[in-house]
Amino acid sequence: MSDNSHDQHEAHTGPVKTPMQMLMLSFASFVIPVFIIIGLVFYVTSENKPAAGAVDVEKATALRIQKVGTVEVRDANRPLKNGDEVYKAQCAACHDAGAAGAPKFAVASAWSARLGQGLDGLVNSALKGKGAMGAQAGGDFNDTEIARAVVYLANSAGGKFEAPKAPVAEAAK
């Protein structure tokens, strides 16, 4: 016969031994998370915590309200540059090397089809841009100076255009 007696085994016991301990454990399991949540809410809403990325408030404000554009006043009475000077400063980087399909300086075969547009067409293409060439209007040179550079470039490849003269100032009324 087998002995089915449970008396020989120790009683199953856990960490809670009394009802008072059970009551305190239950109370703590609800109260401690509430205090943790309250502490997190105070941390998130506090004004003294460092901002994300630690950006200076004055710098951030200055970036937000920076100027959209600027106005540059140029000397309208300065002497106009000739075509050679404008070409060297503005056009030579691409037209000397033929970069991005630009017709090369003094290569008649590259300019033959373009010369048929006439001076107005060539100047319009230079001012507004064409293909990979960006618009040249509004840069360091005025439209007359750009037109002079176009004449210089076209005439180097066999064109017979006359360089535009400086615009005549309106007479004072």
Image: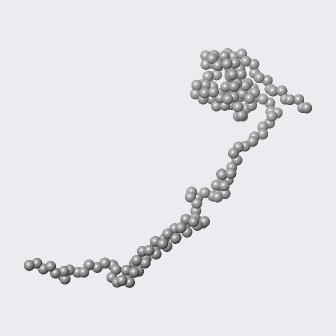
Q: Residue at x 90, y 32 (%)?
A: 172
**Who is closer to the viewer here, 135 or 152?**
135
Residue 63: where, in percent of width, then height? 65, 51
Q: How is the image coloured?
A: one colour
Q: Which residue sits furthest right?
A: 173
Depth order, front residue of 44/104: 44
Label total for image: 0
The extreme left residue here reads 1
Compared across the picture, whether 11 is left or right of 135 comes to left
The quadrant where residue 124 appears: top right
* Residue 135: quadrant of the picture: top right
Visible in this render: residue 134? yes
In the rendered image, the vertical position of residue 49 relative to residue 88, given as above or below: below
Residue appearing at x 66%, y 52% in the figure: 64
Q: Where on the picture, by quarter, is residue 93?
A: top right
Q: Image point 10% across, 78% down: which residue?
A: 2
Percent x, y for residue 110?
A: 61, 19
Quadrant containing the N terminus is bottom left
Q: Position of residue 148 (x, y in %)?
A: 73, 24
Left or right side of 8 for 150: right
The percent position of residue 154, horizontal first and vertical second, equals: 68, 20
**Residue 75 as seen in the image, left or right of residue 118:** right
Instruction: Name the quadrant of the C terminus.
Output: top right
Q: Nearer the viewer, residue 86 or 168?
A: 168
- Residue depicted at x 80% and y 36%: 75
Residue 152 in sight:
no
Residue 14 against residue 45 in the figure, above or below? below
47 relative to 62, above or below = below
